[in-house]
Amino acid sequence: MKDASSSGADDKNGRQLRYSSARKSDLETLAVSAIREHRRLLAADQAVYDEWVLASDDPSISGSVLQALQNEHIARQKKSENQQEELSKILDALGYVPDVPLESDG
């Protein structure tokens, strides 16, 4: 069991080392991409959450549909959390949060 946790630590340290040894311009590009991805994940999670809340107020929606929406929302939250952790490592290595304009719909 000790080997499994040290292997996870090695992976995290490896990613930390990779980010800390990367060029600032590469890190900034990676950070901008990760920030945009995080925004997309949060928007998608919000849409599922809103659908779940609306469905919860509708007595004609079955319990299994509500459970599926809840499960989807929880899964999306976990994915967003994992992506946020990765983004945080990138930003730590970069040393600042780059400006990332909102993407327009047009």
Image (tube, grey):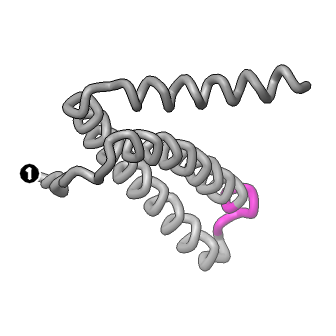
Image x and y of residue 76, in percent: 56, 49
Could you say which is closer to the camera, residue 50 or residue 83? 83
Residue furthest to the right in view is 1
Q: Nearer the viewer, residue 45 or 99?
A: 99
- The residue most toward the left is 106
Q: What residue do we see at 29% from left, 52% from top?
A: 96
Query: On the rendered structure, is 67 left or right of 36?
Result: right
Q: Which residue is mark 1?
A: 106
- The residue lying at 39 percent from left, 57 percent from top is 43
User: Which contiguous range is marked in magenta?
Assistant: 61-66
Residue 27, how many percent across, how many down?
29, 33
Q: Amino acid at mark 1?
A: Gly
Tally the numbered discs: 1
Magenta stretch, overall SS: helix
Q: Is residue 89 above or below residue 73?
A: above
Q: Residues within 10 Å of mark 1 (few under 14, many from 20)?
A: few
Q: Is residue 33 left or right of residue 82?
A: left
Asked if the stretch drawn in magenta spans residue 84, the answer is: no
Can you say which quadrant of the picture contains the N terminus? top right
